[in-house]
Amino acid sequence: MNIHPQTEFRNHTLIVTVSSDDGRPVLDGRAYESLAKIFHEAAIDDDVRVVVLRGLAGCFCLGGDFSEFLDATKHQRLIAAVTDMFRTLATFPKPVLACVDGDAVGVGCTILFHCDMVIASDESTFRVPFVDFGLVPDAATSILGAPGNSVMPALSASSAWATRLVPRTPGCLAWSRRSWWAMSRKPH
């Protein structure tokens, strides 16, 4: 599987799309490194005023590449790449808007806590299955769990609104869908 963040620049907006050849984007070490590099460069580029982070229609991100978790020879590089990406996002000096449609799983959900605003379609679901796999929740994800409860349930879009992961404002969903498809098309 070839995972590649794609960028497009329009009207002082850098649009970063997490995609893969098979339409099911997961993040591997190279993808984390690419995202960190994209955000590092955008931070110092005066022409970039805002970053929009999105996945594919129907799937924002399915999380990290499990094969890298299982390969001990890749742990150091993977930890360095993930840490760099999250530190870059945590200190990013410009607004980051995430547009979610469909699944946001694992790091695909975690990354949303580091964005300034998240807009989600009503078909979106949010899941952090770290505990299911014997992993410790990372990068702010544990705030989804109830105090004293290490199991974090999957969230529907309405549950995500209730926990304030995504805003619920009149017209938000219609706006996000129109925006999703409008940003997918090239201007004439």
Image: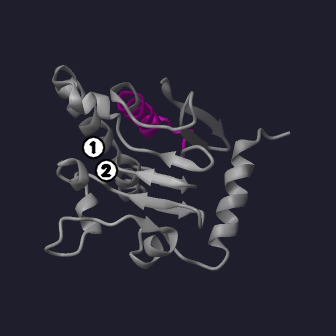
State which quadrant residue 143 falls in: bottom left
Look at the picture and state if 144 lies above or below 67: below
Which label number is shown at residue 96? none
Residue farthest to the top, as pictured: 73
SS at mark 2 in the image? helix
Alpha carbon separation for disc pair 2 and 1: 5 Å
Look at the picture and state if 49 lies above or below 175: above
Residue at 17% x, 49% y: name it: 134
Q: Position of residue 12 (x, y in %)?
A: 62, 43
Residue 129 left/right relative to 27: left
Residue farthest to the front, as pictured: 132
Which label number is shown at residue 90? 2
Residue nearest the viewer, comparing 77 with 73: 73
SS at mark 1 in the image? helix
What segment carries the magenta color? 32-53
State which quadrant residue 75 falls in: top left
Q: Position of residue 36 (x, y in %)?
A: 37, 34
Could you tell me if residue 27 is visible in this image? yes
Q: Are there few (<14), some (14-19), or many (20+) residues within 10 Å of tag 2?
A: some
Which label number is shown at residue 87? 1
Residue nearest the viewer, comparing 182 with 66: 66
Residue at 55% x, 62% y: name it: 120
Which amino acid is tagged 2? Answer: Ala
| Label pair 2/1, CB-CB below 8 angstroms | yes
Residue nearest the viewer, comparing 135 with 13: 135
Residue farthest to the right, as pictured: 188
Which amino acid is tagged 1? Answer: Arg
